[in-house]
Every structure is written in structure tokens, then in C-alpha cells.
Amino acid sequence: MDLQHHVGVMREESGGRSIHEGHLAMNVTEQITHEVKTLSLEAQQEVLDFVAFLRTRLETRQSRKDDIQWSEFSIGNALRGMEQEAVPEYSEADLKERWR
């Protein structure tokens, strides 16, 4: 059963409304519980594995966001006040590295 079919069945059961439209008899958690109860134990384990995967993915995304925020904060503080410092002028000759 593909996702489109499943969504169609869910809409039929809810009078044509999606889970995002208005208040349904069951909230999303109840719908998930209802659907999972109809699955075999093996399929239920797959659902549980998928939930663990989603949790890990979301935690990883949050960790990355935290890392980016910390980096931006650190760089911002490290560079604070540098715009008022005198900038030395370098010539092209100063910047060339000589290999012997």
C-alpha cells in the first residue's frame, strides 16, 4: 500500500478532511496508535525503528544548529572591535612566498 492510497483511506475515514484540517475524532497520536495496533509485531518493530531514526535525525539537526550558533557567537566575539584597528598595507611582493 503506497502513501497516496493510505492518505486517501485516512481522508475517507475522516469525512474527506486531512489530519491538518479542523478537529478530527482522533488526534495524530491516536491515529498512529490505531494504525500500529493493526500491524504485525514485525511491522510494529519497523515502526519503532523508524521512530528511533527520526529522533536521531532531529537530535542531529538540533546539534548542528547549536554548533552553528556557537560558531557564529565565537567568531563574532573574536572579531569584535577589529574593524577599528589599523590595517597594515601589504604589497604583492610581501604576499609572495618564495620556494628554493
Image (tube, helix red, strand yellow):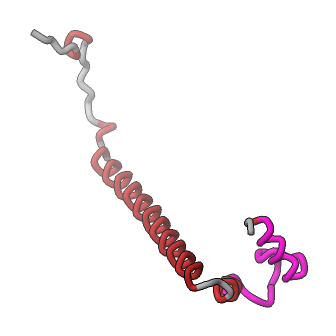
Rendering coords of residue 55 (x, y %): 49, 72
Quarter holding the N terminus is bottom right
Q: Residue 79, percent across and down? A: 30, 44
Of the pair 98 and 45, the residue shown nearer to us? 45
The quarter holding residue 11 reads bottom right
Residue 88, placed above or below residue 59: above
Say which quarter of the image contains residue 95: top left
In the displayed image of the protein, which residue is found farthest to the right?
Answer: 15
How far from the left and from the top, in percent, is residue 77? 31, 51
- Decide which of 35, 79 is in the foreground and name it: 35
Find out whether residue 28 is within the magenta segment.
yes
Q: Is residue 20 left or right of 95 when viewed as pictured?
A: right
Which segment did they paint magenta?
Answer: 4-30
Direction from residue 67 to residue 54 in the image, left or right: right
Please, is residue 62 above or below residue 45 in the view? above
Q: Is 65 included in the stretch rendered in magenta?
A: no
Residue under the image location 40 percent in, 54 percent down: 68
Residue 82, quarter of picture: top left
Left or right: where 94 falls relative to 27:
left
Q: Residue 81, image x and y in percent? A: 30, 44
23 to the left or right of 42: right
Residue at x 77% of width, y 72% of height: 6
